[in-house]
Amino acid sequence: MIKTADLYDLTHTRAGEYLAGFEYPWQALNGISGLILAMGPALGDAYTEVTPGVWVHETASVAPTAHLGAPCIIGAHTEVRHCAFIRGSALVGDGCVVGNSVELKNVILFDGVQVPHYNYVGDSILGYLAHMGAGSLTSNVKSDRKDVVIKNGGERIETGRKKCGAMLGDRVEVGCNSVLNPGTVVGRDSNIYPLSCVRGVVPADSIYKTGGTIVKKR
């Protein structure tokens, strides 16, 4: 339920072959920067290296006020809107929306991901067609600064990382102004109610409701 193969259809990202080498998706976070730097020069003529280490597809739309920090890749037909802040180590897929004042750092966004309004996404992987509502955030550092632990019922999986945000499966919907605490994993096709404070694992095909109640979709 929380393994890479359970969460993602790897045909919907340029990082598919890379991610397939990891049992759990958070294990891939350390290598995102190197992956982008290796991949960028081989992307082909449709991509332009607009600044060193930053590749943008010819059909992508990038607002002049957006900041693209190296290394990053912006895929085909992706829209990067006004004042978006990509700090670097961001692999953004095709047909994505990176919206107004959104901040990205050390992330993989699969194709069709939408983070359109005031989102922070750091040290996270968002699956195919995942969507984060306005103001929803990934929290990637614990308040005590200890290593992040993935909590799956009675199971505790050590990540060995001080920074680990959220792993969202394909087609996950996150409601407005929700906070995904460090080490949150949300299974495919699940929904998070607005104003939620989420931690641990939300199973696939579920609804995370007010107060943390999780119900299976009908």
Image (cartoon, rainbow, N blue to C red):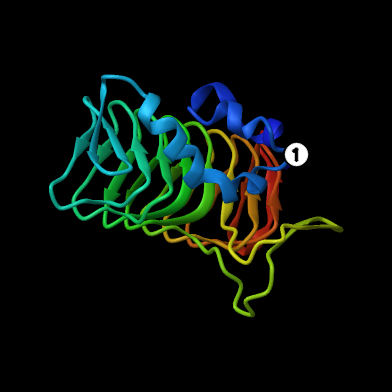
Instruction: Name the residue: 39% across, 24% down.
Output: 42
**156 to the left or right of 36:** right
* Residue 69 locus on image (x, y percent): 31, 52
- Looking at the image, the residue that sits furthest to the bottom is 144
Q: Is residue 173 visible?
A: no
The three-letter code of the residue at mark 1 reads Met
Element at label 1: loop
Residue at image position (37%, 46%) is 71
- Residue situated furthest right in the rendering: 154
Q: Is residue 176 above or below residue 143?
A: above
* Figure check: 172 above or below 148: above
Question: Which residue is pictured at 74% across the width and 38% down the height?
Answer: 23
The quadrant of the picture occupied by the C terminus is top right
Of residues 100 and 106, which is closer to you in this image?
106
State whether residue 114 is above or below residue 151. above
Q: In the image, is 66 to the left or to the right of 211?
A: left
Q: Which residue is mark 1?
A: 1
Q: Nearer the viewer, residue 174 or 14?
A: 14
In the current view of this chain or complex, which residue is farthest to the left? 64
Q: Is residue 147 left or right of residue 106?
A: right
Please state which of residues 19 and 173 is positioned toward the viewer in this rendering: 19
Q: Return the x and y of residue 7 as percentages of the image width and height.
A: 65, 35
